[in-house]
Image (spheres, grey):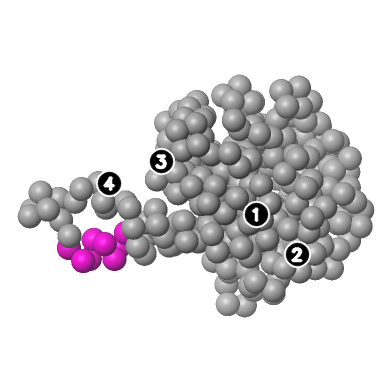
Amino acid sequence: MLVSAKEMLDKAKAGHYAVGQFNINNLEWTKAILQTAQECNSPVILGVSEGAGKYMTGYKTVVGMVNGMLEELNITVPVALHLDHGSYDHCYKCIEAGFSSIMFDGSHYPIEENVAKTKELVAAAHEKGISIEAEVGSIGGEEDGVVGMGECADPNECKAIADLGIDFLAAGIGNIHGKYPANWAGLSFETLDAIQKLTGDMPLVLHGGTGIPADMIKKAISLGVAKINVNTECQLSFAAATREYIEAGKDKEGKGFDPRKLLAPGAEAIKATVKEKMELFGSVGKA
Ligand code: 13P
């Protein structure tokens, strides 16, 4: 059964480790991530962007697929199904469809409007036992065509949003989605420290988990980060393994590739990436 992400993240924050959010795009990714979480005895969050939800035909299909896998793969570790960077309308769609967690990304609205919309969605989510993440300060890079500049959040705005009753908070601290440029200044631990001082026990979320050096990840966890999002790194490992398989030319005498065999190396690569992240984040054995 899907669970809200609140309890697993409160535990992670108190225990000084982080739970990984791995974004899903299809059946193979979902299965690989769930199997790895079970094998590592780790809680896990499956992230679904609006674009990925659309690609997988819609949120109800995603909920059906994930619930079916939890049962048929005998998954017993805590699993949350979470809308990633949701708009106001799509938060409602996911609440209706059976997601167990949502993120409302109101970071592009003026702070007053972000506050008003977040407040309303907190009530709607909590009424159904669903956890909710909010964002302050846009996270840089490009995701699903949305480009942010990677600013640092204002700690006082973070406090204002945290006080609305959200379950965890994403705050920009110089992190960006996708690969980091060579001249990246690194995470702003000063900002993170100030945010944690004002928001207390609130689990903090680090987006753009791909390409952040291990020592920075560990320091971020020590300053209150309890959820780390990873997408690009799974994409890169999946693509590399699939490319290698195709280049090896193992098609069936001109009949093309067996689709199940074609996608298997990519799924194995995702498993390896997810396991490595769970070890780095410290969530192994924490289910
Ligand atoms: P990366 O694609 O950089 O791993 O970031 C993922 C993310 O933050 C999803 O919200």
- Measured in 3D between alpha carbons, the distance from the residue under mark 2 to the one under mark 4, in whole angstroms, is 39 Å
Q: Quadrant of the N terminus?
A: top right
Residue 256 appears at what percent x and percent y? 14, 50
Extent of the magenta region: 242-249
- Which residue is the site of mark 1? 285
The disc labelled 2 sits on which kind of residue? Ala
Dot 4, how many residues are within 10 Å of its Cα: few (below 14), some (14-19), or many (20+)?
few
Dot 3, how many residues are within 10 Å of its Cα: few (below 14), some (14-19), or many (20+)?
some
Left/right of residue 10 with respect to residue 54 in the rendered view: right
Is the CB of the residue bearing disc 1 within 8 angstroms of ligand 1? no
- Which residue is the site of mark 4? 260
Is label 4 in a helix, a strand or a loop? helix
- Which residue is the site of mark 3? 27
Name the residue rendered at 62%, 50% in the picture: 42
Secondary structure character of the magenta stretch overall: helix
Name the residue rendered at 59%, 25% in the picture: 98
- Measured in 3D between alpha carbons, the distance from the residue under mark 3 to the one under mark 2, in whole angstroms, is 31 Å
Residue 142 appears at what percent x and percent y? 55, 55
Closer to the eye: label 1 or 3: 1
